[in-house]
Image (cartoon, helix red, strand yellow):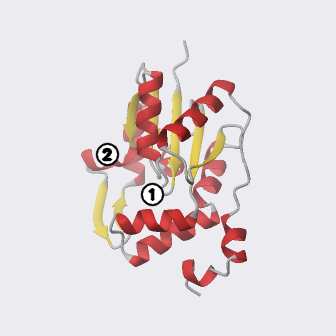
Amino acid sequence: MKKLRFVITGNPGVGKHTTAKIIAEKINADIIDINDVAIDNNATGKKTDLGLDVDVKRLVRLLEKQLKAERDLVIVGHLAPYVLRPVGISLVAVLRRSPYELEKTLKKRGYSVDKVRENVASEILGTSLYDSLKTFGKRKVAEFDTTGKTPKETADEILSALQKKPKSKLIGIDWLNLVSEKGDMRRFFKY
């Protein structure tokens, strides 16, 4: 029987890890946290103002070994599009969140002003979605808006999509238009 390889990715602060825990529990799968694999196996470099540098090649090799496991897996992390290959991946859930809500979340976490701005700008531009589509293809990628939802609500929505195995579920989240209409471009982008 083919083992499930389910990926949850998105920008920091969108609810990836909490949602992954709920899903893994419901489907009796193990979790592979990409950040933990990098840190636990010395695949990180120096810490910068924007986070830890990661040895991508080393992390790719480490994850490939773990993906050979004979059990269902939920793989979680914002680095997924850069360190995983599409072969064997069942579905990639890209979690999205309103830039206004995301900004509050990241500030509460104590992120620096530059790190908040970088992550919110990435969310507005849909970088995680774009990179996931580029890596895994649109047949394996679905996006989910977590704005105003509990992690359980998001997990239930994802599990429903996983059971239906959609060709793709791109809902066309457009934060750029929202931010532009509100006149907040300068708030989130330096130019």
The quarter of the picture where residue 154 lies is top right
Quadrant for the C terminus, please: bottom right
Amino acid at circle 1: Pro
Residue that appears at 68% across and 43% down: 137
Instruction: Name the one closer to the observer, 166 or 140.
Output: 166
Instruction: Identify the residue under disc 1.
Output: 12
What crowding class fits label 2: few (fewer than 14 Cα within 10 Å), some (14-19), or many (20 or more)? few
Rendered location of residue 179, percent (x, y)? 66, 73
Residue ID at (41%, 27%): 25
Instruction: Kindly report which numbered mark, 2 or 1, lies closer to the viewer in this rendering.
Output: 1
Q: Quadrant of the N terminus?
A: top right
Residue 16 location, x and y as percent?
A: 46, 46
Q: Identify which residue is drawn at 49% across, 45% down.
A: 150
**Residue 19 vertical placement versus 24 (above, below):** below
Which labelled disc corresponds to residue 36?
Answer: 2
- Find residue 99 and report its horizontal and vertical position in percent: 56, 66
Q: Is residue 95 left or right of residue 36?
A: right
